[in-house]
Image: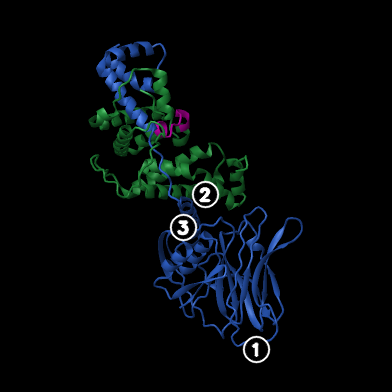
Amino acid sequence: MNGFELSDEWLIERFKEGDDTAFDQLVRRYEQKVFQHAYRLTHNLDDAADVAAEAFLRMYTALKRFRGEAQLSTWLYRIVQNVYFDFHKREQRHQHMPLEISSDEDEEPMELPIPDESFDMDEYLLEQERQRVLREAIDKLPDYQRVVTILFHVEQLSYEEIAAATGLPLGTIKSRLNRARAALRELLEPYRELFEIESRPNQTEATDALRTGQSTAE
Amino acid sequence: MRCEQVKALLNDYLEGALSPAVVPSLEAHLSVCASCRGEWQFRRGIWRSLAQMPAPSAPADLHARIMTHVRAQTRTRAVSQRVLVWRFVGAAAAAAALFLLGFLSARPGGVMAGFELFGSSSRSGSTSSLPVESGIRLEWRDVGESERVPVLRAALNREASAMLAWSPEPNLPPRQAQRIWQGTLQPGKAVEIPLPLLHQKQTARAAATLWWTVDDQHRAFFIPTGYPPSARASLRLRAHLSEALALLAETYQTPIEWLPASHETNPLVVLDVRDATLPETLQQLLIGTRYTARAEKGHWRILPQ
């Protein structure tokens, strides 16, 4: 790195002029983000890579018409969702794995952030279990609920950003999100004690933790 | 505040979107009602685990997978589903010594991609004792300020009719390629053919296909034109051999030379490799065909077994 970065707009202009290396740079810039979003929708490394590849192909063909009305990143979120829905439709995979199945032979181990100091093995295992159960519950949500849940709670986008990334009005996003929260809550009811952690109500502390992903000291 | 009201407001409370006027009475209720407090803690735990969902690390070959997919799709759409059968009428006598030197240097606004090719140095039947440079060489010439034009320089140590053609798609047979130059090579006299098409952005491909024909013997050169190379790649395709070779040339940024066999078709090949190097990929690709791959200095040669 030499201290400055070429802007998306500049690279897009270069690409429109026929410079394919600019496209290569754009891919490098966003491939991790795109892959991760795709993974959170598919929960399969191979499918996520396929979705990412197809999303960039669509970006390649559509970029010439891109007028910069949205951020490239939000636009890419939208493409990823469309690709995911198309793949999903094609595969007709409406059968989801039951919550009990836990053999993840073809899935690579997920890396949870492990703090160096005061590492708590019990808490680490508990969190892994929470993540497993949560992932399976999210898989059971209808597609339209899953997308807003992931964008709001996991990717931590604001309502306005979600509106740009999905093209939905704010009211629709909020109602879908609330339906998704209620559905998740029902699906996770059997695992209630896993998620119910003793603490006193304190709004600022709670909200900060929930929007940044930091766990708070209990 | 009643439990029903509290539970209806919990999501807003967790989001930090609850009106400050309501917060104290809600918190007061939570501190005395175990049922509502439990509900709040439960939802809070879900929200927190959602926020902590781990990000998977992308596969190491993600970039190569994406670029391969984009290139393959943007090309095969143009090629469509044509099935082409090639027939190559047998070549005349063994070709004279053919040295090929390819060189792509820094293009204006492009990336650096340099390579050298050396073809067969066998001088079968040559009685010439003239120390003639023999073969073709691709190089970039400076013309004016910061302007460069690719030039192909060809020479042979005997007299022969020759033709250079550019193919817009690797799948087209050589007779359908666009003729760039045709003439007679004289021993010891070099011919220089400018190739502005390799320079034009509109026609620039990730790998250009050039047909070089001497005495009715064709050979194809798939010449990479400037994508960053991949040492390993994952490729899944079903295509004609020429198309597959052009894709490999651009993916691995390695020039590939192909000598189609006499009376041979351009066979359909399938490929499914993960995280493979070029030699591994070529080995997989050529299984079941009548071709074999040989490493030369700086490039690969695909020739009949």
Q: Alpha-carbon neighbours of circle 2 within 10 Å: few (<14), some, or many (≥20)? A: some
* Figure chain in green: A
Residue A208 is situated, as x and y percent measured from the top left of the image, at 43, 24
Q: Alpha-carbon neighbours of circle 3 within 10 Å: few (<14), some, or many (≥20)? A: many
- Name the colouring of the figure: by chain
Q: Disc 3 is attached to a residue of which chain?
A: B
Is residue B263 in view? yes
Is residue A81 in view? no
Secondary element type, mark 3: strand
Image side of residue B84 versus residue B161, left or right: left
Q: Find residue A60 and name its label.
A: 2
- Count the marks: how many? 3
* Figure chain in blue: B
Picture quadrant where residue A196 is located: top left
* Residue carrying label 3: B233
Question: Closer to us: mark 1 or mark 2?
Answer: 1
Q: Quadrant of the N terminus of chain B?
A: top left
Residue B97 is situated, as x and y percent measured from the top left of the image, at 61, 80
Which kind of residue does numbered mark 3 sit on?
A: Ala
Nearer-N-terminus badge (3/1):
1
Image side of residue B194 versus residue B71, left or right: right
Secondary element type, mark 1: loop
Which kind of residue does numbered mark 2 sit on?
A: Tyr
